[in-house]
Image: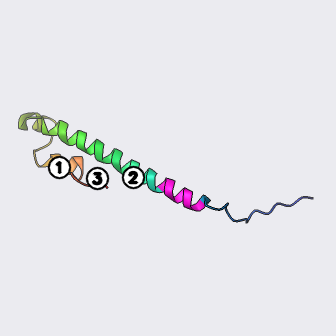
Amino acid sequence: MATFETTRPAPFGAEITFRFVSYLDAKRASLVEWNNNRVTRNALSKLSNHELADIGLSRGDVDVISGPAYRFF
């Protein structure tokens, strides 16, 4: 019967590469979230107070709904 060694270390540099790729992916995700918030904020800012009231919002709700304005990284 054959047995396999399942607790061997990762190849040299694999963990560093994984962490770097994870870091880049997290930065990409924050960039996508920031851009979505920016687009939402711009679209809602172009609406009049009457149009905002029609969808149940006020001018002060725009910043709350669209998230932080300048949290890019």
At which x and y percent is residue 12? Answer: 65, 62
Q: What percent of the width, then of the height, locates residue 54? A: 12, 34
Give the magenta-colored segment's residue range. Answer: 15-22
The quarter of the picture where residue 57 lies is: top left
Q: Residue at x 15, y 48 (%)?
A: 61
Q: Which residue is mark 2?
A: 27
Q: What secondary structure characterizes most of the magenta part?
A: helix
- The kind of residue tagged 3 is Phe
Toward the right, the furthest residue is 1
For this rendering, which residue is in front, 45 or 56? 45
Q: What residue does disc 1 label?
A: 63
The local secondary structure at tag 2 comes to: helix
In this view, the residue farthest toward the front is: 12
Q: Earlier in the sequence, mark 1 or mark 3?
A: 1
Residue type indicated by callout 2:
Lys
Q: 19 or 61: nearer the eye?
A: 19
Q: Residue 45 in the image: x percent, y percent? A: 13, 39
